[in-house]
Image: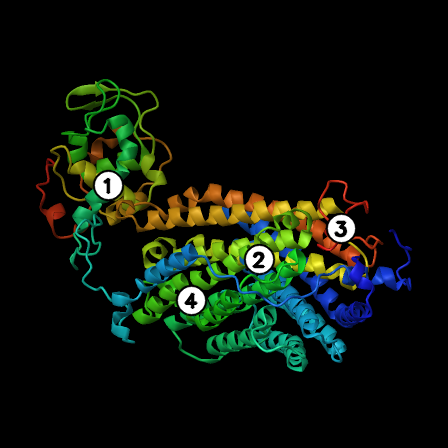
Amino acid sequence: MDSTSNSPDLAADNQRRAAIDKSVRGPVLFLFLNGAFWLMLSTLLGVLSAVKLFAPGFLGDCEFITYGRLQPVHINALVYGWGIQVALGIMLWIMARRSGQELRSGKGRMLAAGVFWNITITVGLLSILMGKSTSMEWLEMPKFVWPVLLLCFLTYAWPIARMFGRAIRPEGFMVSTWYILAACFWFPWIFITANVALHCLPGLGALGAGINAWYVHSLILLFFVPVGVGAAYYFIPKITGQPIASQQLASFGFWALALLGGWTGMQKFMGGPLPAWMVAVGSAVGVILLVPFGLVGLNHHLTTLGKHDAVSYSPTLRFIFFGSLFLPVTGVILALTSAFWTGASMQFTQAWYAFQTVSVYGFFSMCAFGAIYYITPRLAGCEWLSVRLIRNHFWFSVYGVSTIVIMSLVAGWQQGADLNNPEHWNQDFMNHVINSRPYVMARAIAWALISFSNILFLLHLMLMVAGLGRRSNAPTLLHRDHGHDDTHTPAQASHA
Amino acid sequence: MSAPAHPDSTDLDRIHAAVKREKADQAPSNAPAPMWAIFLLMLVSIIAGGQLGGNTGSLSFNTSNPFPAATPADDVRPGGSGAGDALDPFALAMKKGSSGYAVCGGCHQGNGNGIPGQFPPLAGSEWVQGGTERLIRVAQHGLVGAITVKGQGYNTPGGMMAFGAAMSAQDLANVLTYVRNTWGNEGTMITKEMVEKVRSEEKRATQWTEADLKPFADKNVAGDIPAGPGATAAPAAKK
């Protein structure tokens, strides 16, 4: 759009990037579309399981929809159906773009792996509903599921890592690609370790619970966080047109996360039958992780500085901006649940749900939405149809997830403080359950709002993938209510 | 700027529009981190370090509780930390019964004196300190009609409800033990087994009257009473 785009170099570069987009089109759109479907399902189940928590008789006494089965299905659909699936799509696209590599071969294998991934998750989640849950958090799906999921993941991770290897790149730290490359290696490590330990080693005793908690923490800190941060580091400079503010902060943040991310988890069982030092180390690291999270947040803040108008009209930047705002919040909640002073009141309460929601939904999913709003028009060859749908999606998500996180945190604090209060020794446990009902109701309402916006998001994405989007040279921007016209200025056109 | 609507359009200009409007990737710059941020993160590190120290239990694999001697003196739970091994069942029943009495106190009042003419007193009452059989039956099934307590006549419309029916045997036993040993009352402890025995013998759905209960006035339900103050309290029941 600007005058320089007519120079031969830039024209060739444009052709090259368009060719890269075309080469990853199939797998990436497949992952996005299926991910959005699971997201919608997961949020609907979030409503239902929250309702089941305060009204167990809702929809009858059918065993398949009891809270104990719905809640794991809700979380597993969110983590494996939406989270990891869409993360693979984002990783593939960003790595291809940043490495300047087309996807040469393996597109068919990737699509097959994607189909297997979705079938496996469907079978796994149905097994949970049938009562075949393993009762291990985030690993509730039956034993046979994990080797299939691992192979499917590697089918994507290997070509992504190869792209990085083939890239012609300048020396030094490549912020977004390092995060994504690391995620390619960290996920298999975490996934294999946890599954082998929990499914194949007999007689773990209490340590098994600790390993399970380590798995959940590590999957968040060493997979969802690097992918989300990698996307934010890619899209914020891309849209604001400013370079990443500080190379040093970025590099320090990465290495701090790499060194510290795998040490947390055991603190979930503080005061429990685990060696005290394991708990203490998890607790200390859970607090000190605020440092890398704070540094990354600071770096994003400095990069966005002076370009905040772009947040208001670029859908991508708006989602990413709030996603990266939720990163330090994730760090604070992790620190609160980890430190001994506060963790003693928050362990085994709804505060745990607040941490899962803020990290997987508040931080990661918001970044993923931003990435999807950027990537999809390039792959589908058409522009997003409706400003209003995007805007609704944004506001419902932000208010919804904030409500869930705040409510769960306050409810958790209240539950924990009440349970620990010696004066309450003769209180019925049911009283604590009844006291937390208002918070759970608020959670149900918030998930309902989010579900509504995610149904619209899925429809919007389906239309885009079907090629039924807007045919135009101009991006869909949020700068005014009737955003369907093409009257924006060229300067703004470069923001999407 | 609108373009042809056909998806197979060969209009490269439009197909590549999204690519063309992108901004170029740039190398990161070297902005310094603000000082306040460094101080804040140092504070975080100090707090994090505070989680280590004594909490690590000397890095031993055999220590799961690094502070075994921690016994808060103000722990009010009977049998809570610091109570020792011996748990006095009588004290436990009195403690639990005192909170269970909140239900009874609505009519019989907190001081156990009732309200003249309406609700009979529990303090010093021969109904309470007398045979355990009659007391359990009143609480379990309720009582209706005119009765005489400590020489005064009482007749409440509707009488006393069958409160015990909705309580667990243990809760009912705790409350009755409490009532029998407060406000100067003295009586043997009533155990869960006694309440269960009465429940299994008597399944009536209607309230008792004073005349119905006459035969049970001085009867005690058979059953073992745990050793301790609950067993040694002088039974005031007229044998």
User: Mark 4 Cα within 10 Å, few/some/many (few <14, many 20+)?
Assistant: many
Q: Which callout, 4 or 1, points to the residue nearer the camera?
A: 4
N-terminal-most mark, 4 or 2? 4
Question: Does residue A216 appear left or right of residue A399 in this picture?
Answer: left
Q: Say if residue A55 shows up in the picture.
A: no
**Badge 1: chain ID:** B
Dots 3 and 1 on the same chain: no
Amino acid, disc 3 = Thr
- Residue A303: image tag: 2
> Can you tell which of label 3 and label 4 is closer to the viewer?
3
Q: Judge from the rendering whether residue B170 lies leftward or rightward of residue A285; answer left or right.
A: left
Between the C-alphas of marks 3 and 4, the distance is 42 Å
If you read the primary sequence from the N terminus, does the residue marked by circle 3 or circle 4 appear first?
Answer: 4
Quarter of the figure with residue A379: bottom right
Q: Earlier in the sequence, mark 2 or mark 3?
A: 2
Relative to residue A372, is residue B238 drawn left or right?
left
The answer to which quarter of the image holds residue A242 is: bottom right
The part of the image, by quadrant, that contains residue A317 is: bottom right
Q: Amino acid at mark 1?
A: Gly
Tell me whether circle 3 and circle 4 mark residues in contact (CB < 8 Å).
Answer: no
Q: Indicate the secondary structure of the residue bearing disc 2.
A: helix
Q: Counting other residues with Cα less than 10 Å from the Cα at mark 2, is it few (<14), some (14-19), or many (20 or more)?
A: many
Which residue in the structure is indicated by mark 1?
A: B97
Q: Which residue is mark 3?
A: A476
Q: Which residue bears the numbered disc 4? A: A265
Observer-nearest of A441 and A488: A488
Residue type marked 2: Thr
Mark 4 to mark 2: distance in Å?
Answer: 32 Å
